[in-house]
Structures are given as C-alpha cells and as structure tokens.
Amino acid sequence: MIEFTPENKKTFDETLRRYPTKRAALLPILWLAQKQFGWISQPVMEYVGTLLDLPPVKVYEVVTFYTMFQKRPVGKYHFQVCRTLSCELCGKDEILRRLKEKLGVGVGETSPDGRFTITEVECLGSCGTAPMLQLNEDFHENLTVEKVDEMVKGLE
Amino acid sequence: MEKILTKNWSLKDSQTLKVYESTGGYKALPKLFAMKPEAVTEEVKKSGLRGRGGAGFPTGMKWGFLPKDNPKPRYLCINADESEPGTFKDRFIMELDPHQLIEGTIICCYAIGAKVAYCYIRGEFTFPMRRLQEAIDEAYDAGYLGKNIKGSGMDLDLFMHRGAGAYICGEETALLESLEGKRGYPRIKPPFPAVVGLFGCPTVINNVETLASLPFIIEKGAETYRTYGTEKSPGTKLFSVSGHVKKPGNYEVPLGYPLKKLIYEDCGGMRNGKALKAVIPGGSSVPILNRQEAEEVNLDYESLVAKGSMLGSGGVIVMDETTCMVKSLLNLAHFYAHESCGQCSPCREGTGWSRKILERLEEGEGTAHDLQVLLEIADNMMGKTICVLSDALAMPIQSFLQRFRGEFEEHVRLKGCPFKN
C-alpha cells in the first residue's frame, strides 16, 4: 500500500502552502516520495498524481525528464561519477576504471547484492576539485586511486 | 582593494548570521528602506551590474521591464541551478556566505515589489542547500525575512525549490516551467518573464552572484562599485578556474583583469611543467581561445567578444599541451546531447549527430567530409531554436575547428588519436 508516513503527510501539507498551484509542488513531493520509497515506481507516480490532482501521465512526464528521479531501484551506495570536461581533463577515466574494478560493477549497473550502483553524470559544479563523484547525497572531491580504495573499504 | 563577494570566505563560521553581521552584513537595509523602490532600480542601473550567470544582461534594465500597471503579484526566482561546465562559484557563495545572497534577495524584492522569492537550486547541491536553508532560518528568526522586515513594512518569504538534474533548468524560462511542476522546456520569447513569468505573473530571475553583488552596491553606492572593473564592465567577478593549473578554485578579480595573470600568478601556472594550449574562458558554451589569444585577453565582456569569445559564467577551463582537442570537443558534445530538452529539431538532432561524428573521429573512423558536415550542423544549430543550448554547442564546434583544425585532420589522416598512449 503506497502511502506517505504521518510525518511525510505533514511535510506534504507544509510544502503545498508554499505554492499557489498544486502542480508546482510536484518536484518537492517527488523528492519526498523518493526519500520514503527509495525510487519512483509507477504506483508511486499514481499516488503522487492523486495527491496533487494530476493525471498520472503528468507525473510520468516529469519523472522521466529529470535524471535524479530514479525510475528503477538503485543500490544502497549510488556512485555518480562526473564525466564532463574538467573532470575528464583531470583524470576521471582512471578513477572510473578503479571504481568499476573495486565494486565489480559497470556503468549503469547495480551489483547483484543490491549494494552498489555506478552511473556517469554531467558536471556537478565541483570542477576545482576534479576528479570527483557524488556518493548518494555527498560529494567526494580531489579523488585519487588511493582515495577510491579507501572509500570502498569503508562501506558496509 | 576590498573584496566585494569573497569578503567573508576565509572567516571561521562565515556562513552564520553572527559572523555576517560582525563584518557589516545587513547594513545595506537601513539605506534600502529609506529609498523609494524605483530609486533602488536606478542605483542598480547606474552601477552597471550585469547578470553574472552567463548572459550578462544589465540587471537594473531587467528589473525596469516589470510592467507598472499589472495588478498580479511579482516574483523573484534566484537562479541557483549552476550547471555550466567549468563553473562552481554560486555553490561557494551559498556554502560560505549565504546571508550575502539573502541580503541581495531582500534588496531585489524591495525594488521590484515581490513578496515571495523562490531559490531554484540544482538537486545535486545538497550541502549548499543545507547551508542556505540554515541561513534562511536564522534570517527569519532575526526578522530579516517574514512579515514587516525590521519594521520597514516589507514582507518577504523565501523558499528553497530543489531541482532534479537538468542543466536546461538554468535557462530562465525552463526554470519557470520546472518551478511550475513541469518538464524544463524553455518558452518562446516574447513574452519575457518580466511581463509573463512565474504562474503568469511579472517575474525577475537573477543569478546567485548577481544578487550577492547588491548589498555592496546599495550600501556603498553605484559610484563606488564603478571604481572596480572597467568603464563598460564595472565591478568584480568570481572566476572559477579548473583544468591543468596548479591552484584551481574561485578567484574574485575586478573585471578587466588579464587572463594571463590569473593563470600564471593567481593559479600558480601550469601543472607538471606543461605548456598552455587552450582556454575556455566563460564556461563550456563560449568559444575556445588558443594559447596566444588567452595570454593576450582581459577578462571583461567587451575584450572577450573582441577576441571572438565571451565572458559567460566566468568558468575558466585551462588545457595543456597533452590535451586532445577532438576528445575534449566530444566530451562537450556528449554533455549537450544529454542535456538537450528535445523540443527543437536543430538542437535535438544536431547535438546527437555531432556527438556521433566526433566519436567516430576520436576512434579513428572519421573522414575529411565529417569536418565539413560538423560545420554545416553547427551552422544549422545557430540562432534557430527556442533557447541557446543549441548555440552553446555550435560555438564550441566552430571555434575548436577554427583554432585546432589541424588536429582534427590529423585524426582523419592517422586513423586514430595521436594523444592516445
């Protein structure tokens, strides 16, 4: 049964008050849904649509446009490696290679045990500390092969 | 000369209200509330401040476009979507001096009569978002936001609105679409946001750095602001330097500053004793400069245009002699192909097509004819679409080929990349 927790229902109500239209709350509510359910499945899209008086396709349009809304389950640890120019100039190829090796996973793939996912993403606004990646919500910058090894070792 | 934007960055707890006020923060407000809103717009016009997000449009003029007789509410949208490759300045304004942004927001909203401001921040900026929200909470508690700000009679609510991974949402009208809960498809202009913007209401969209420049302008005056920079490009700008320099990072300099000085002095010069080969001076969407051009040019709007490039966002990407220009252009083509919203055929098809051609060139399967096709594609992408994402790849294609054609031809001749080891 897809439903927001009581706490999230409260956040939902507060969020709606910030906008003159329900539709404008779609992105914040999708973030809330992703936080609770882990990813945005079709039932979740339909639930959000009902809450905001939106036809499901209007939710689907948005979920499929924005890269950070996950349309499939992601691993517990989602490594998003920046691939854009400055990071490439500063050695992201080597970092990505090492990461794939250590995790045993390719780009766009999730490990069979569901722990690790690797994706390549576009410029994360951290070019001065390239190469870098985003692990779940956090930036890991000035990466070296050694730092990658350290990062992976520290994960449960 | 006193720093304008980075004044507090090296202080411990610079992001807190306590530190912001201790160095003179929020002192522009008493002056602000003693002025008529129209006078504030005039002062900003006089200062010559131009949009620091990339377009460089005169800020005061943009505010002046709001219709006087329209009864609808007015909005400010803070553009914190910072996604232009090579640019990472707004992030640090939010992390290290969020109150400066808030004070600038208050100034703008007072001038344009907005009671609600939304900060559209890219979804990946979790830490800057947290810092800014903490500062917003402090500001509400201290009476700088909310009802009757410091007894002035002005009301202002400031809400964060988190994006979800779309470069195109940094384009003004795509930002509005996204804020309204839709796909980030840029709108046809006119009408411009000043007349028909957020929820159909008169709206100003300003970049984080632009707003952060306002407290100084109001407190110290437009004349003082103009003592920095050049006649046509007054003020200071944050330049985000990345790539093959020893000390990448953000540098606040007066406009007109020599790029050569920035690279060789402030940034400590090139890494590993390599020679400079090329510089993209204003974020990936502006034409690339070769070594000679880069070492000759000053960092202001006019000088960069004269050299065949643009100031843009001020994202300076420095490339040394080991860099393959074909691979680098391919990197950018991949970016724009991914980020194209898909509305306009020249962009949707042109970005994908040029990426495929560049892939083949880099793999050694390119032909001489490919170079001609690339230029034809670029020509068909320039000035023919609803927004300038299309132009943002067309200009790199044209400028890379113009300045480094030999390298592209070499890839064809050698049937491979001469830089691959």
Image (cartoon, rainbow, N blue to C red):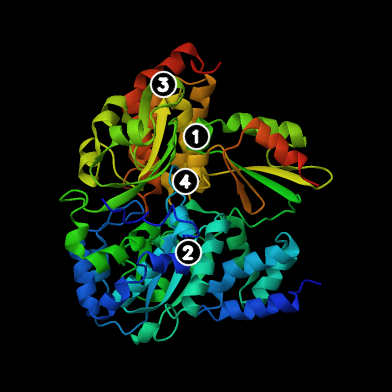
Mark 2 nearby-residue class (10 Å; few <14, some 14–19, many ≥20): many
Pinpoint residue A11: horizontal percent, then vertical percent. 64, 76
Name the mark nearer the viewer: 2 or 4: 2
**Amino acid identity at mark 4:** Arg
User: Which residue, given by chain and number where applicable, does mark 1 sit on?
Assistant: B331
Which of marks 1 and 2 precedes in the sequence? 2
Task: Pick out the residue farthest to the top.
Answer: B414
User: Which residue, given by chain and number where applicable, does mark 3 sit on?
Assistant: B408
Residue under mark 1: which chain is it in? B
Pinpoint residue A145: horizontal percent, then vertical percent. 65, 31
Vertical relation: A52 (above or below) B25 = below
Pinpoint residue B246: horizontal percent, then vertical percent. 44, 31
- Dots 2, 3 in contact, CB < 8 A: no
Give the image quarter of residue B24: bottom left
Between marks 3 and 1, how big is the CA–CA gap? 15 Å
Marks 4 and 1 belong to one chain: yes
Between marks 2 and 1, how big is the CA–CA gap? 27 Å
User: Which residue, given by chain and number where applicable, does mark 2 sit on?
Assistant: B120
**Amino acid identity at mark 1:** Asn
Mark 4 lies on a secondary structure that is helix
Marks 3 and 4 belong to one chain: yes
Residue under mark 4: which chain is it in? B
Give the image quarter of residue A69: bottom right
Taking depth in this image into account, of B348 and B397 the one nearest to the observer is B397
Mark 3 nearby-residue class (10 Å; few <14, some 14–19, many ≥20): many
Taking depth in this image into account, of B80 and B228 the one nearest to the observer is B228
User: Which residue, given by chain and number where applicable, does mark 4 sit on?
Assistant: B348
Between marks 4 and 1, how big is the CA–CA gap? 17 Å
**Amino acid identity at mark 2:** Tyr
Which of marks 4 and 2 precedes in the sequence? 2
Marks 2 and 3 belong to one chain: yes
